[in-house]
Image (cartoon, rainbow, N blue to C red):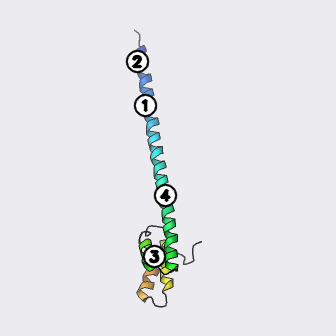
Amino acid sequence: MHLGWVNEMKLRDMNWSAFSLISMLLIVTASTLITTNADATSLTKQRQQYADARHALATGRLQDFEYLAAQLKDYALYPYLQYEELRRRISSAPEKDIRAFLDNYSYYSCRQPN
């Protein structure tokens, strides 16, 4: 009895499995690259917004500062924006604002980031 067709079927199954595996790897790689690119774009945007917010605060454009800072609440340097804003008005800031800042950001150093 000749079983050549069995070997041929096994070879087709192996080729299909290899093709499926390679296809899945390509999809995962592509989606990772897209996500990484989107994250990098988002981080670049946040960095620019951070710089813009600091500039707005330094030039007294408080509405612009508040608008930009509100968009950066998930950005790692957000507490430093809050610090700069509080520092600007420290002589007139209510004690509750100072305590709230200290409670919220006790784990941050209050040194200026470079």
Instruction: Give the amino acid type for the residue marked by disc 1 in the picture.
Output: Ser
Q: State how far apart marks 1 and 3 are (Cα).
A: 56 Å
Compared across the picture, whether 104 is left or right of 111 comes to left
Q: Are marks 4 and 3 in contact (CB under 8 Å)?
A: no
Q: Which residue is mark 1?
A: 17
Front tag of 2 and 4: 4
Q: Which residue is mark 2?
A: 6
- Numbered tag placed on residue 41 in the rendering: 4
Q: Earlier in the sequence, mark 3 or mark 2?
A: 2
Camera-side residue: 47 or 78?
47
Q: What type is the residue that disc 2 sits on? A: Val
The x and y percentages for residue 40 are: 50, 57
Label 3 or label 2, whichever lies nearer to me, is: 3
Residue 21 coordinates in the image, percent (x, y): 45, 35
- Disc number lying in front (1 or 3): 3
Sooner in the amino-acid sequence: mark 2 or mark 4: 2
Measured in 3D between alpha carbons, the distance from the residue under mark 1 to the one under mark 4, in whole angstroms, is: 36 Å
Number of the front mark, 2 or 1: 1
The answer to which of 42 and 104 lies nearer the viewer is: 42
